[in-house]
Amino acid sequence: MNRREFHKTLGAVLAASAFPGKALAANDTQATSAPASAGTVAATNAASQIAMLVHPAFVTLDLIGPHQFFTSLGNVNVHLVWKTRDLVSSSNGVVIQPTTTLKDCPKDLDVLFVPGGLEGGTALMNDAEVIDFLHDRGQRAKFVTSVCTGSLLLGAAGLLQGYRAASHWTVLDLLPLFGAEPVAERIVEDRNRISGGGVTAGIDFGLKVAGRLRGEQHAKMLQLMLEYDPQPPFQAGSPKNAGPELTQKVRDFRAPAVAAARQAALVAQKRLQG
């Protein structure tokens, strides 16, 4: 059994615990159209439909962390979505093959997900094709979600107006341009919006969404199977822990990209208000 087959089997086994009395196939393709909810999605025989945007220069871990949990849920279809099915390169050169296009992505989703990648996301904040896709699917999705700077794209699509949201700490102050309330937390859940902080928060985010889709016990089983028990060798993963000197160095390093994102966000703000 190879790794892919293992995770399919794992998902099916764990799904049986989430859907008592019926072992569910990991590759079931039936869609679901239940209304949006901020609570745990009720158990049905339909496969959960999850769309994950993969755009040029996305941050690999933003996508892969949540993807690991999503594909281990059982009875789920995870769609990697882009404009075409041509290969897409991440910010560090990892190449991803989209599985469907924006046009062909299922209309009704359990989860709409956007990863971060500041430079790549900045280029798309006013891209009509991407923004229209996010706005359309986000209107019906049970959960509208993001990790890191992916929340800026959700905001640019008009999906965070009046919602609390997280993002990477260097761009939290851009969220109010989209009518969102910035929250400096690792995971922020506001009704059916779930957003994660920077990059590695995607793992915590994946667990949170797994719990919403399949229940807390299922998510805990996944956490144990994946041995997610973080014990970092350094305590410098937030401005509070890193201290002012190191924080300023990171701000200076990211300043050009953040400035470009701010300009794109201002254009998006004007578009949304117009």
Image (spheres, rainbow, N blue to C red):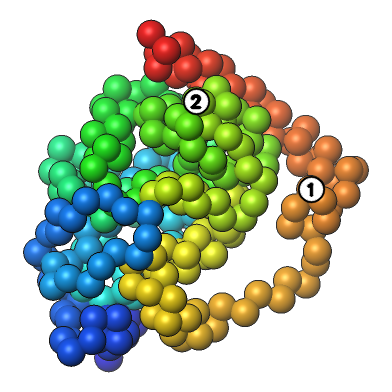
Badge 2 is on which residue? 178
The three-letter amino acid code for the residue at tag 2 is Phe
The three-letter amino acid code for the residue at tag 1 is Pro
Q: Check disc 1: other Cα within 10 Å, few if <14, some if 14-19, many if 20+.
A: some
Q: Is residue 108 above or below residue 248?
A: below
Circles 1, 2 touching at the beta carbon (< 8 Å):
no
User: Is residue 252 left or right of 146 when viewed as pictured?
Assistant: right
Residue at (58%, 59%) from the top-left corner?
200
Of pointers 1 and 2, the one earlier in the residue sequence: 2
User: Is residue 94 left or right of 7 when viewed as pictured?
Assistant: right
Q: Nearer the viewer, residue 123 or 12?
A: 12
Q: Is residue 71 above or below residue 272?
A: below
| Count of marks placed on residues | 2
Residue 115 seen from this side = no
- Residue 179 in picture, x, y percent from top left: 51, 26
Q: Check disc 2: other Cα within 10 Å, few if <14, some if 14-19, many if 20+.
A: many
Secondary structure type for disc 2: helix
Q: Is residue 124 above or below residue 165?
A: above
Residue at (23%, 81%) from the top-left corner?
19
- Residue 1 in picture, x, y percent from top left: 27, 91
Badge 1 is on which residue? 239
- Residue 33 in picture, x, y percent from top left: 15, 54
Residue projecting furthest to the left? 30
